[in-house]
Image (cartoon, rainbow, N blue to C red):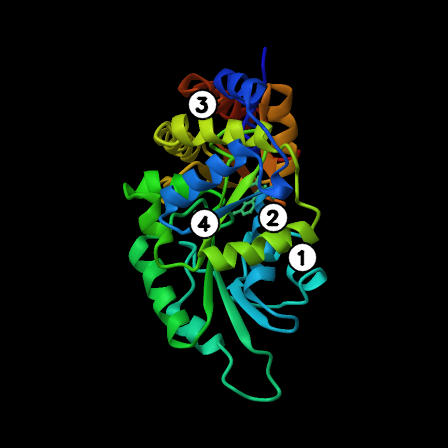
Amino acid sequence: MAAIELRSDTMTRPTPAMRRAMAAAEVGDDVFGEDPTVNRLEEMAAGLLGKEAALFVTSGTQANLVAILAHCGRGEEMILGDRAHSFFFEQGGSAAVAAVHPRTVKNLPDGTLDPAALEEAIRPENIHFPRTALICLENTHNLCGGAPLAPDYVASVAAIARRHGVRLHVDGARLFNAAVALGVPAAELAQPADSVSFCLSKGLGAPAGSLLCGERLFIARARRARKLLGGGMRQAGVLAAAGIVALEEMVERLALDHENASRLAHGLAAIEGLALDPRAVRTNIVYFDVVKPGLTAAALVAALGREGVRLLATGPRTLRAVTHYEVTARDIETALSATARILEHRGPPA
Ligand code: TLP
């Protein structure tokens, strides 16, 4: 029996159409700007996000770091949420590589930052302070339950940024999940920001790669930063070809992943010993807590693993499940019955 893989949408494997496109891809040396498939993907991405230009990079982590390098100088400051992926999970690259000082503002449960708190965190002119150069948002917000940020919220943050001469970057690793969930074009979510990144390798199913989009001059700086980080990939058209299929064929269907996530969340909420608010699940990410005495997240993950259902323990009592195109509605039912069985049979310690 194949495992039901709910640890992450990064686990998705390329579709048969992607593999065919990869095998047939026309390629050249992308560091010389001569890979026609990469060039096509970059044009497509820029067009979809309504930006002048785009850059194909290795990963979401590289997209964020390249954006930070292209927006900020050494010793400048960037403001981001205290639960932002780039603050939590990216090896402190802003400090370690870009010499950019991260300053956090508390993320609210819906993934936003309170506008007043954000504006207060922007440094006034003072010789003692680092200069605030960048604000980063995340859409959808991974650690805030996959929450999508609405276009008017992004626009309100952009207005604050502009008022203070600060740039706005959106980590849109799952931007298309946000667009589909909110029923708006991705370009509307991207419009207020100076730069936006998105990943091909998550719910869109491509094997690797992300795009960073923005103004032409910004992308020219980003291209140099990508080279600095060793991200010039030569005949990367083999990967870009899968990305083009991802953008053509895998966006609209994200709605099914959201339905499955919601079904999973409602099912989990009905199981005694688990706690979550299923109404908060708007995209493809479900976090829930184990509240049954004597049962930890790690023990539940291990027990589910034995039943062929893979989830991540993200805290002592917290688990994460992420839906994607390789998870069916029937898989959700299977995962739910396995979870219910385990919870029923594991009583408190004697
Ligand atoms: N997220 C991964 C893990 O790193 C946690 C996942 O399984 O969700 N921004 C956001 C919002 C992300 O969720 C991720 C990956 C990244 C950036 C980084 O992308 P990659 O893994 O391509 O470097």
Q: Earlier in the sequence, mark 3 or mark 4?
A: 4
Q: Quadrant of residue 330?
A: top left
Q: Nearer the viewer, mark 1 or mark 4?
A: 4
Q: Residues within 10 Å of mark 1 (few under 14, many from 20)?
A: some
Q: Residues within 10 Å of mark 2 (few under 14, many from 20)?
A: many
Q: Nearer the viewer, mark 3 or mark 4?
A: 4
Q: Earlier in the sequence, mark 1 or mark 4?
A: 4
Q: How far is the residue under mark 3 from the one under mark 4?
A: 39 Å
Q: Dot 2 lies on which element? A: helix
Q: Which quadrant contains ligand 1? A: top right
Three-letter residue code for mark 3: Ile
Location of mark 4 (residue): 53
Q: Position of residue 315 (x, y in %)?
A: 61, 46
Three-letter residue code for mark 1: Gly
Q: Tell whether circle 4 marks a residue whose Cβ is less than 8 angstroms from ligand 1.
A: no
Front one among 322 and 40: 40
Three-letter residue code for mark 2: Thr
Q: How far is the residue under mark 4 from the one under mark 2?
A: 19 Å
Q: Earlier in the sequence, mark 2 or mark 3?
A: 2
Whether residue 269 sits left or right of residue 294 in the image: it is left
In the image, residue 148 sits, relative to residue 10, either above or below, namely below
Asked if one can make out residue 277 in the rendered structure from this viewpoint, the answer is: no
